[in-house]
Amino acid sequence: MRIAVAIMAACSALALAACTESAADKQAEAKADALESQAAATPNEAQESSLNAQADKVEQQAGNADGGATTANTPTTEGAAAEKH
């Protein structure tokens, strides 16, 4: 009985961890948002593209920063690959 309770508690903890956003995720999101704001404010299209690419990279790295414990905020790279062509 104790083993079953321990297993249930461990599963609950893992489920909760998968639903929460880590501090690293929040920090990366704030950095990406700041880069995107700078991109939107610049009249230089090349600089805008560069800043947006940097923001995408930060978001991509943050999606992997927690070892895959959270997946809800993992960005996709499909759009970035399509833009390069």
Image (cartoon, rainbow, N blue to C red):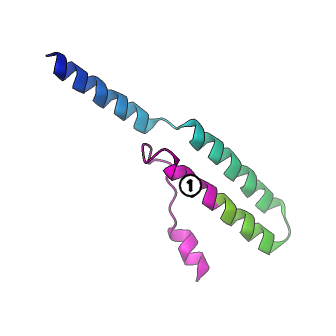
Task: Confirm whether the magenta stretch covers residue 41.
Answer: no
**Residue 38's image quarter?**
bottom right
Q: Nearer the viewer, residue 76 or 58?
A: 58
Q: Where's residue 83, x and y in %?
A: 60, 76
Q: Is residue 85 above or below residue 59?
A: below
**Residue 82's image quarter?**
bottom right
Q: Is residue 6 left or right of residue 16?
A: left
Residue drawn at the location 84% of the way across and 71% of the way down: 44
Q: Where's residue 28, x and y in %?
A: 63, 47
- Name, please, the residue furthest toward the bottom: 85
Helix or strand or loop: what does disc 1 sit on?
Answer: helix
Q: Which residue bears the numbered disc 1?
A: 61
Q: Is residue 79 left or right of residue 35?
A: left
The residue segment tinted magenta is: 56-85
Q: Where's residue 6, x and y in %?
A: 24, 21
Q: Quadrant of the C terminus?
A: bottom right
Task: Confirm whether the magenta stretch covers residue 84.
Answer: yes
Residue drawn at the location 42% of the way across and 43% of the way down: 69
Q: Is residue 80 above or below residue 19?
A: below
Q: Is residue 44 left or right of residue 77?
A: right
- Name, please, the residue furthest toward the left: 1
Q: Amino acid at mark 1?
A: Gln
- Name, please, the residue furthest toward the right: 43
Q: Residues within 10 Å of mark 1 (few under 14, many from 20)?
A: some
Residue drawn at the location 78% of the way across and 61% of the way down: 40
